[in-house]
Image: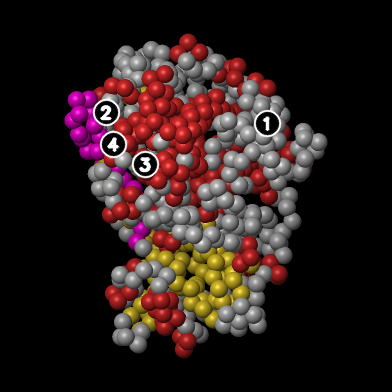
Amino acid sequence: MAEQQATIDSVLAGRGLAPEFRLPRGQFLEALPGEPPPLFSAFVDQHLRQALELAYRFDQVTNESGLDAAIGAIGEALRAESVVGLVQYSVLLFLTHNPQGRSKIKIKPLEMRQPDLVLSSSSANLAASTAGSRTSPPGPTPPDGLGYWREDPLINEHHEHWHLVYPTSLSPLPAPTASGYPIGDRHGELFFYMHQQMIARYDAERLALGHARVNPFAVTPYTESQFRVPIAEGYDPGPLKLWDGEKPYPFRARPAGASISDLTLDESSTGGPNWGKIRPGAKLSQQVSFGNAAMVAATTGTYASAGGKAVNADNLGNTVEANINAVDFVDTNPPANHPLYGNLHNDGHIHFMLYDNIAPYGVMAATTTAIRDPIFFRWHKLIDDIYFSYQETLSAYDFSVGPKVTIRKKDVSGVSDVILCLGDGLPASIAGHKFGSRAYNDLAAAAFGGAEWHNDFSHGSVQLKSGETITTTDELVTEMLTRKIVLEQDGGKKVEETIQYLSHDDFYYFIRLQNDDDHDQTVAVRIFLAPESESADRRAWIEMDRFASKIGAGGRVVVFRSADQSSVIRKPALRPDDLTNEDGATRAREAQAWCDCGWPYTVLLPRGTREGMDFRLLVLCSSGDDLIMPDHPECCTSISYCGLQSLEYPDKTAMGYPFDRPFRMPIRNTAQSFSNWSSRPIRIRCKNI
């Protein structure tokens, strides 16, 4: 098994391969400028189908002859494939979806398998070795100070892994069921929601650094002139490159002031596509037409095709992404496919990666690098505008029918039932106990229940019978840290590169719930956060957690919840100590498998400011019948952005509920008006900026 792991590690690293795994195109970038071979992109249907076909072959060989035989098939594929990174992606798909492969082979973290893909764009290290490898003038590193977030290796790895878990196609293509092709339950809705949440989180970072929230790339009604406007903000990826076949593929800069254009590049001579002929949105006029058609469907609730099929969040997401469950999916023949609504989202990535029709591509080509370019968020804000416009057509919820539960709020009753504590505010005696154990539950009940139930602990302390103290807080704390990335230069020389990243102090929720009904209840507890200045806008709310809680008839309970158990984050949570090992072989990292999907724990909180940035924390209880979590340990609980493997999405409510449609009254008033809602102000302070 160790040999299998080592071979796969080399394949995914694109270096140190045994002769039988080396590509005949290994010298493809020996002299630049020239004609580099095409780079794999998961946003390109043809590329993804080829990768899925290979992954299926590896799957079949594994099931019939074992993993060693599959590794042999991987070697054969590497020797035959001309598209850079395609076989690597097929191996990642195979390891993500094949049970035997997933159980025996671990996918190393992105910064360990491809460290040159996580370098800072401002890095000076190795700059000399990449000089002369550019085919366009460098674009300035965006001066917004947000490189630490867009270029965070774990955020980029999250985006990569989400698209591995939810590919847009299948191979072989089965007969569709009544609910469509099996590419993941509520795939389209989750595509919309996960990316919307990325924008909300990015907006919070922008506000902390004094910038406005993201503007969409264009606004409806879309016009070709809007799409051709020069993009003021450029992006230079610096020494960023992908290794595949002993030579690196460099990513091009997109200079400030450049515009996107019709796709005309023909790479057929190097084994790639003729872009102008295979993409439904090759011309910007086509992209504009598709975007406007999607917006019409979103705002009218009806598609112009499929017999006037009704729009919902899931089929709209499928159509805009676009995937094989799009309403205008015809077959896998690109020129015939998606004739009415196009391949809007994916073709947008292609236009930005080939803004001037010159290879090599820009970072928008790859799921591992796209987030690094600020244009990613502007493009996705346009995509989210379509989602938001659909939501605006929906009727507001009637929150008066919620569960009979009380969560007090200080601005109404003088007592807040939403209590926060930092890790150093807990007593030492709790250390070593498993989270969720009786010791934790007893601690919560003793500190904030019983005789303490009517006291407010928004900020202060409570003494336990043991004499120990719990200190509560109205301020959560983040910090900027650095760690080393180990790079290998030609000749095997190892060098270290420092990257900066965001993290935070551990924190905990104590949430007091009172059952106002005469029978037992299970409620779904949902926690959200928004910058106070934006809290009236439902698009600004960031999901922090959701979980089920039982309350006895007429009873009271103090729910003790650790932030590292959040339904948003990948499990187990990776803390800074887990990110410092050169080989990545920490206990937490070794446990990663399907659970690689999920938001990084280190960036669960926005950065905040030096003085402390004002946020609003909101907690509501909805019916527990809606949130059904599996009870077997193999299932990850990073459900919010990733769902559950091969199972239905465990929450029956709309993703983002209750912020998935308009409110009857302002959000703040809603929280004040219903007993099963509570909100409170908090601050987030970065302690070392």
Q: Is residue 328 left or right of residue 215?
A: right
Give coordinates of residue 278: x percent, y percent.
59, 20
- For marks 4 and 1 on the same chain, the one whose residue lies earlier in the sequence: 4
The amino acid type, in three-letter code, at marker 1 is: Phe
Question: Which is the main secondary structure of the residues drawn in magenta?
Answer: strand
The reply to whether the C-beta atoms of the residues labelled 3 and 2 are less than 8 Å apart is: no
The crowding category of the residue bearing disc 2, from other C-alpha atoms within 10 Å (few below 14, some 14 to 19, many at least 20), is some
Which residue corresponds to the image point at 28% horizontal and 54% vertical from the top-left? 577
- For marks 1 and 2 on the same chain, the one whose residue lies earlier in the sequence: 2
- For the residues labelled 3 and 2, the Cα–Cα distance comes to 18 Å
The numbered dot on residue 16 is 2
Q: Is residue 443 visible?
A: yes
- For marks 4 and 3 on the same chain, the one whose residue lies earlier in the sequence: 4
- Return the residue nearer the eye: 642 or 257: 642
- For the residues labelled 4 and 3, the Cα–Cα distance comes to 10 Å
Disc 1 target residue: 329
Give yes or no for residue 488 being in the magenta stretch: yes
Disc 3 target residue: 105
